[in-house]
């Protein structure tokens, strides 16, 4: 399995140094949840997920042998309200690693289609920790009918079969740098690069917040990672953890 070669391309101090490659799992995020004792920076990666999870109970299509499905165990000293910002840091890392664009908060897109999704979870308890799960369509040739119009893969975009280990290592390499900066200064020194790569800014969006639907134009993202939306009669800010942004490229 080509996923075993990740260490050959890895250039990190702690992210992915402990890496567990599985032939099959339900969800690499769930795998992390079941193994809270693993050290900070541990990565679980699987060749296939039988129950790949998206946000809000949605699923992540994870066929065998083609995608990169991996999750990072993170043990920062971080108040729970900052955890959703890890998604933004990871989004920027993936964006840089695979040369995509970011659709706020957690999608990476290429040519207007979704190539990657990110699911960050907070596990409460005596020793709380975070899980940052990343799914990238690497060598996917085709998608189920319901995803065809809005999903793509690196293979589809480049017509080249990609080395999954190298792609994953590139993401982890980028992530470690951005994450270290995030832990030091929050999003302050990262947000400009995030915004430069974010296709949501300047576009009309529909935001679903606490079952209320709000339409408006996204004008900016705050230094703590909130979306600023101008509606007909007011300006609101929404947190990435509490919204689904629709309206760009027609998909959720
Ligand atoms: C996400 O959720 O985009 C987060 C996906 C995170 C997946 C990774 S894989 C490793 C780790 N282990 C897990 O179990 N999960 C993480 P959300 O924003 O809710 O988007 C989900 C929606 O994206 C679905 O409802 C579909 O419309 C679409 N979708 C599902 N599979 C897809 C795929 N392979 N490519 C593109 N779009 C997909």
Image (cartoon, grey):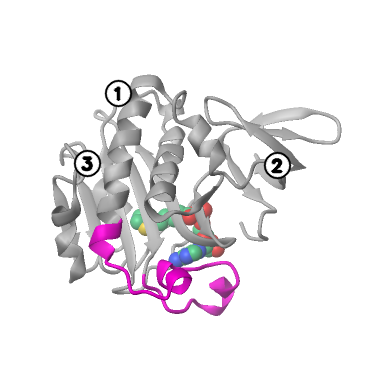
Q: Earlier in the sequence, mark 2 or mark 3?
A: 3
Q: Say what secondary structure mark 2 lies in.
A: loop
In this picture, which residue range is highlighted in magenta? Answer: 139-167
Instruction: Name the side, left or right, on which 36 lies relative to 122.
Output: left
Name the residue beneath numbered marker 1.
77
- Is residue 124 in sight in this rendering? no
Name the residue beneath numbered marker 3.
15
Decide if ligand 1 comes within 8 Å of the CB at mark 2.
no
Q: Earlier in the sequence, mark 1 or mark 2?
A: 1
Residue sitting at 27 percent across and 67 percent down? 163
**Residue 180 picture quarter:** top left
| Nearer the observer, 232 or 190 | 190
- Cα separation, mark 1 vs mark 3, equals 16 Å
| Mark count | 3
x then y, percent, for residue 103: 56, 49
Decide if ligand 1 comes within 8 Å of the CB at mark 3.
no
Query: In this rendering, is residue 224 above or below 24?
Result: above
Q: Is residue 77 a member of the stretch shown in magenta?
A: no
Furthest residue to the top?
185
- Cα separation, mark 1 vs mark 2, equals 34 Å
Residue sitting at 45 percent across and 27 percent down? 187
Residue sitting at 33 percent across and 33 percent down? 179
Name the residue beneath numbered marker 2.
202
Q: Say what secondary structure mark 1 lies in.
A: loop
Query: In this rendering, is residue 75 above or below 109?
Result: above
């Amino acid at each position: 399995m080509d996923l075993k070669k990740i260490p050959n391309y890895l250039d990190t101090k702690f992210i992915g140094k402990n890496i567990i490659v599985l032939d099959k799992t339900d969800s690499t995020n769930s795998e992390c949840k079941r193994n809270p004792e693993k050290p900070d920076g541990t990565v679980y990666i699987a060749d296939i997920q039988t129950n790949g999870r998206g946000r809000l109970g949605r699923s992540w299509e994870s066929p065998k042998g083609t995608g990169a499905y991996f999750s990072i165990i993170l043990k920062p000293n971080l108040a729970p309200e900052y955890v959703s910002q890890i998604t933004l840091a990871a989004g920027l890392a993936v964006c840089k690693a695979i040369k995509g664009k970011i659709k706020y908060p957690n999608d990476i897109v290429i040519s207007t289609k979704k190539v990657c999704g990110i699911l960050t979870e907070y596990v409460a308890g005596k020793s709380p920790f975070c899980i940052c799960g990343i799914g990238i369509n690497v060598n996917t040739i085709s998608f189920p009918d319901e995803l065809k119009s809005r999903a793509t893969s690196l293979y589809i975009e480049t017509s080249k079969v990609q080395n999954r280990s190298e792609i994953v290592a590139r993401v982890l390499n980028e992530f470690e740098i951005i994450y270290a900066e995030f832990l030091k200064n929050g999003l302050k020194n990262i947000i400009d690069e995030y915004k430069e790569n974010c296709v949501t800014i300047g576009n009309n969006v529909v935001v679903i917040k606490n079952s209320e639907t709000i339409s408006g134009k996204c004008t900016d993202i705050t230094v703590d990672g909130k979306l600023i939306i101008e509606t007909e009669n007011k300006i609101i800010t929404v947190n990435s953890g509490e919204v689904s942004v629709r309206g760009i490229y027609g998909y959720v």
